[in-house]
Image (tube, rainbow, N blue to C red):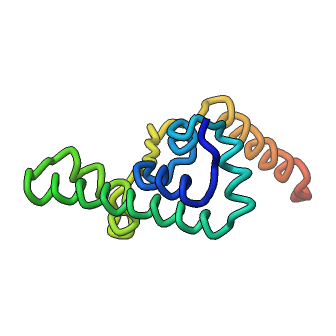
Amino acid sequence: MARLNINTFRKALIKSGGNQTRIATQLELTRSAVCHFLKKHPEMRLELDNEAEQTIDVSEDIIDMAIMVDRDLDTAKWKVLNSKRGKDRGYGPKTELEHSGETQPHTFNLIVKSVEEIKREKLDNQPKAA
């Protein structure tokens, strides 16, 4: 098991992609030991976050290359559907509701019956002409 200090952490960080579990595995430590180290050394948390950001940047470059160079349609669809810019342009999962135009017969009948009853009551309550 490696002794965790700033230099050891930095060496493990290089190949980690900002993944704490990967760092712990490389150093033969538990993930909680890495978390504890990061609490004691907040400046290392910043380095970890920067490494994670670089990994995202590389991933985005790979996705963009797959789209621009390889013309990969599936990757292009994925990016449009999952990016903020794509969503702003109207792409993304949409919920569509379909209505058959039919109503539930019992609800309609109750409403019609109630209207008929009201009409009858009005007729029954009208003064009779002499």
Q: Nearer the viewer, residue 127 or 64?
A: 64
| Quarter-of-image position of residue 5 | bottom right
The answer to whether 30 appears left or right of 66 in the picture is right
Q: Nearer the viewer, residue 93 or 99?
A: 93
Location of residue 4 in the rendering, given as x and y in whole percent from the top left corner: 63, 49
Residue occupying the point 38% across, 55% down: 82
Residue occupying the point 80% across, 42% down: 117
Task: Single out the residue that lies furthest toward the top.
Answer: 106
The answer to whether 73 appears left or right of 8 in the picture is left
Q: Nearer the viewer, residue 83 or 12?
A: 12
Q: Quadrant of the C terminus?
A: bottom right
Q: Nearer the viewer, residue 3 or 117?
A: 3
Q: Quadrant of the N terminus?
A: top right
Location of residue 100 in the rendering, given as x and y in whole percent from the top left corner: 44, 37
Location of residue 14 in the rendering, given as x and y in whole percent from the top left corner: 42, 55
Residue occupying the point 39% across, 63% down: 54
Considering only vertical position in the picture, is 43 above or below 73?
below
Location of residue 104 in the rendering, given as x and y in whole percent from the top left corner: 60, 32
| Quarter-of-image position of residue 98 | top left
| Quarter-of-image position of residue 63 | bottom left
Considering only vertical position in the picture, is 22 above or below 81?
above
The answer to whether 18 appears left or right of 89 in the picture is right
Residue occupying the point 50% across, 41% down: 22
